[in-house]
Image (cartoon, rainbow, N blue to C red):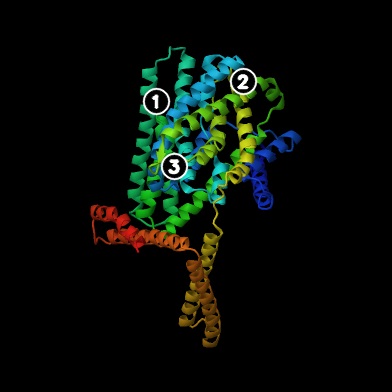
Amino acid sequence: MNHDALHVDLFVVLLMVTATVAMSVKWIKLPYSIALVIVGLLIGICHLLPPVELTPDLILLIFLPAVLFEASWNIPLRELKEGWLPITVLATLGVVVNTVVVAYGMNYFAGVALGPAFLFGAMIAATDPISVLALFRKLGINSSLTMLLEGESLANDGTAVVLFKLVLAIVLSGASFSAASTLGNFVLVVVGGAAIGAIIGYAASRITSLFDDHLLEITLTTIVAYGSYILAEQLHLSAVLSVVAAGVVIGNYGSRNSMSVGTRMAVNSFWEYTAFLVNSLIFLLIGLQVKYDLLCKYSLQIAVGIAVVVVARIIVVYGMTPFLRQHNEKIPWKWRHLLFWGALRGSICMALALSLPDSLAAKEMITITTFGVVLFTLLVPGLTIEPLVKLLGMNLVDPVKEQYKELKARLITKKRAANFLAAQFKSGAVSSACFELLNADLQEQKDSLKKQIENLHIEDASVKELEIEEVRHRLAELENDCLKELTKEGFITEDGRQRIQLDLPDQSEKLAEP
């Protein structure tokens, strides 16, 4: 068997492992990504697979753009705007504070030289709370808190990478540190990367308005995800923030104004699967990277690294959030606890550590220490975040609202079944006797579901608020789709459509008025 065939076989085996784990966690109460890490550890201990190298190019050039684009594509711009201040502060000043605290802690308690210590501090500042966010959504945690954690993660991925590269350049060149010069470069790279991504996202959004082909538009979004990353890299700007900005723009503007509903669903499905596949392989490969002899060799550095990372996160979260506001209100204490404990580390930290040049004497120590800290955050906070959520009483799934949604979903399916049956009858595919029998049965089921929904409205006033919000959102989408069609038909201009769209949120909000 040749070398390439071996890689293909190994890839298929890894896919089989991820599929098996995904099916198993349906019955085992364990976060999917954490389960993959544990399985990877077990495979590595038992040497069940040949060694699989997790390279920086594999993560940064192949995996990372897909993960970033899928996450930013699905971020609602309205919620992002509401939480922009805490997200920005935590992802910029928070990253700097985290880096400084970790660096001096490693220097003082583990005897690591300041240069390597600052490299470690910068790379470990990037959070990766994928499993935590999945848990939050499953438990129905406040969407603003979820957005705060996700927005911080996406932004600090970019700022931490930028800071890491600046520190690495200083360490390798032996140049003296200049706060003013470093800060200026930091701002330029961050803002420039975001600007490049926003421009690419807007340009792609305009291009998608020229046609309606789901395969072509999936291809275009793939070009946007990887093209924005590569272009920013070539310009020495933040590639991470470039992808995030492009995803936010095309996800909130292009997908709503330039894509049909069917195309938008197809693109969503493609990126949902891509992110699932990539994240699965990342977490499984992290578990496979264990080198137990080296973990023992650098056990002191790992222990100190874990301690200073925890302390730095405490300082960032509890020291900064009291001065930050979201929705013009202070961030609640319970939110702060989850922001602190939910800041897991993951693939970006590993990729940055692996990307260190071999000429750096401390590369092995930094890489193994980083892996030890990543493993700790994935297994300890990752496995205890759900009990913490329940201890804080933040499991916010409302059984009445869940019942309403299930009843509404059943009613919608019955209505669509009835419409299909009517169309079949009109076309002559179904006889009159068969139609009358089945239609009467469907009508009876619809009436029963409507009655149950009406009873919920009477029992709980919050059901009415939920329904109004859902209908308002659907009406806004319908109006946007209608405007898009009118623009394509030449009935109104592009500028006219944009002026009308500015008024749509205000018009839809009036529906909520009694």
The residue that mark 2 highlights is: 365
Q: Residues within 10 Å of mark 3 (few under 14, many from 20)?
A: many
- Tag 2 secondary structure: helix
Q: Spatial distance from mark 3 to mark 2, Cα to Cα? A: 33 Å
Picture coordinates of residue 416, whole percent (x, y): 49, 71
Q: Residue at x 45, y 82 (%)?
A: 426
Q: Label 1, label 3: how many angstroms apart (C-alpha)?
A: 23 Å
Where does label 1 land, which residue? 186
Among the two numbered marks 1 and 3 on one chain, the one whose residue lies closer to the N terminus? 1
Residue 6 location (% of width, % of height)? 67, 39
Q: Amino acid at mark 2?
A: Met
Q: Nearer the viewer, residue 19 or 391?
A: 391
Q: Which residue is mark 3?
A: 225
The mark closer to the camera, 3 or 2, is 2
Identify the residue at image location x=40%, y=61%.
Answer: 474
Tell me if residue 171 comes above or below residue 306 in the rendering: above
SS class of the residue under badge 3? helix
